[in-house]
Image (cartoon, grey):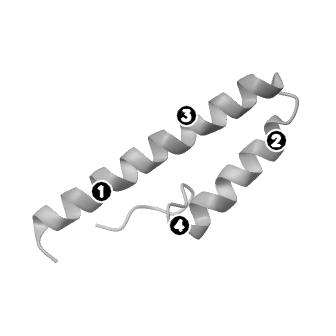
Amino acid sequence: MGIFDRFKNRHAQDKARDMSDTAERKANDKTGNKYESQVDDAQQRMERELGMDRDRPEQP
């Protein structure tokens, strides 16, 4: 894997995280934050399944 491949992969992950955050905000707005913890749990599970776990440090 070349250095440019890493940058492309990193960019794709950043974009996916941004999209995930946007979806979480929209879901919370639609529900009036009534289900905020459930939406957050679902977002974390989805990101973990896709290998985007925010709690895990980034690999160089």
- Tag 4 residue: 50
- Tag 3 residue: 22
Judge left or right: residue 2 versus residue 23: left
Query: In the picture, which quadrant includes the N terminus?
Result: bottom left
Q: Estimate the x, y position of residue 17 in percent, counting from the top left.
A: 47, 47
**Sequence-wise first label, 2 or 4:** 2
- Tag 2 residue: 37
Mark 1 element type: helix
Judge left or right: residue 9 versus residue 41: left
Q: Quadrant of residue 30?
A: top right
Q: Estimate the x, y position of residue 29 in percent, counting from the top left.
A: 72, 23
Q: How far apart are labels 2 and 3 at the CA level?
A: 16 Å
What amino acid does circle 4 point to?
Answer: Leu
Image marks 1 and 3: residues in contact by CB distance under 8 Å: no
What amino acid does circle 2 point to?
Answer: Ser
What amino acid does circle 3 point to?
Answer: Thr
Mark 2 element type: helix
Q: Estimate the x, y position of residue 15 in percent, counting from the top left.
A: 38, 45
At horizontal 82% and vertical 22% (from top left) the residue drawn is 32
- Tag 1 residue: 10
| 57 is higher (above) or lower (below) than 15 | below
Q: How far apart are labels 2 and 4 at the CA level?
A: 20 Å
Image marks 2 and 4: residues in contact by CB distance under 8 Å: no
Crowding at mark 3 (Cα within 10 Å: few <14, some 14-19, many 20+) = few
Image marks 4 and 3: residues in contact by CB distance under 8 Å: no
Mark 4 element type: loop
| Labels 2, 4: front one | 4
